[in-house]
Image (cartoon, rainbow, N blue to C red):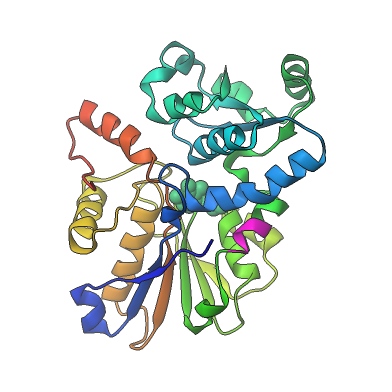
Amino acid sequence: MHPINQEIQLPVLEEKKVALYLKREDEIHPLISGNKYRKLKYNLIAAKENGLDTLLTYGGAYSNHIAAVAYAGQKEGLRTIGVIRGEELRQNWWDNPTLAMAREHGMQFTFVSRKRYRHKGDKNFQEELLRQFGLFYAMPEGGTNLLAIKGCGEILTKADVDFDVICCAVGTGGTLAGLINTSKAHQHILGFPALKGDFLHEDIRKFALSQNWSLQTAYHFGGYAKVSDNLIEFINFFYRQTGIPLDPVYTGKMMFGVLAMVENDRFKPGTKILAIHTGGLQGIKGMNKLLTKKGRPLISVT
Ligand SMILES: *Cc1c(COP(=O)(O)O)cnc(C)c1O
């Protein structure tokens, strides 16, 4: 499974003499984020090896990870349980495209308050899950664990050694850790967090085997799943120019950041950049529903 590296043609790249390629991991599957698919690969094998027929995981209403677990579970013949943040969703989860899609692929939900969700690791809560669902293979929110990082170590290929800089959107940092651990010493891995906060450095340091990486924290647009009209305009512009759809939560922010850095001469002329398109396109529908309610511009990438 080796998606192509597609060269991006834009006037600013030509002007600054920077080469930018996009690794089309989004094309691995129309609904499942490329990186979520890779994060699940070895976890699915582990679940089966341990004789477990149920996957349980955690997430918010728009989670690409929830969508991916539902889909992969059904494909592999495993029962899937989603512990979903937000009790209020019990009343209307079917209005949420991500949850509706997850249910279509057989996921069973349990909705919990934000407070209980924060304490989901507590013994009491875990015992209750065990009583309710029996033995299960658990994956954390966002799907990051050691096996997920191993899976993300299969994103870069031998042919990618020519790139100087590898760019990737960051949620939990698992994908970035996989890239760092399979990069070459002459390469720099640049992460673009989609969330606010400083905890990420620490999280990534725990998993990273080398030090050729940094985070560019200026492009989170107010935090997780927050979007500005400016960002939406950029995503629509990028689609018109290149024919490539970006998602509003991760890849849109990363690509905005990469091109802003090119514009600001942050890369030397002659630099070869590989940006990872991690997917996330299933989230556009839900985001457009929210934007419609607020009377704001919509993402139009089809
Ligand atoms: C989850 C996700 C990320 C971030 O992955 P992490 O391993 O959590 O950092 C990036 N892009 C997309 C599209 C995602 O769904």
Q: Position of residue 229 (x, y in %)?
A: 21, 46
Asked if residue 264 lies left or right of residue 93, the reply is left
Q: Position of residue 189 (x, y in %)?
A: 53, 71
Whether the magenta-drawn stretch holds residue 207 is answered as no
Please tell me whether residue 73 is drawn above or below residue 266 in the rendered image. above
Please tell me whether residue 8 is drawn above or below residue 246 in the rendered image. below
Q: Residue at x 36, y 20 (%)?
A: 95
Asked if residue 250 lies left or right of residue 133, the reply is left
Where residue 152 sits, quadrant-wise, is: bottom right
Quarter of the image where the N terminus is located: bottom right
Q: Residue at x 21, y 52 (%)?
A: 236
Q: Residue at x 46, y 53 (%)?
A: 28
Please tell me whether residue 24 is drawn above or below residue 10 in the rendered image. above
Q: Position of residue 293 (x, y in %)?
A: 23, 26
Which span is picked out in magenta?
A: 150-154
Name, please, the residue furthest toward the top: 91
Res 300 visible: yes
Where residue 234 sits, quadrant-wise, is: bottom left
Judged by its main secondary structure, the magenta piece is: helix
Q: Position of residue 138 (x, y in %)?
A: 71, 35
Whether the magenta-drawn stretch holds residue 153 is answered as yes
Q: Residue at x 27, y 35 (%)?
A: 288
- Number of callouts: 0
Name, please, the residue furthest toward the bottom: 270
Res 196 visible: no
Task: Please name whichever residue, 201 or 293, is drawn nearer the observer in this view of the structure.
Answer: 293
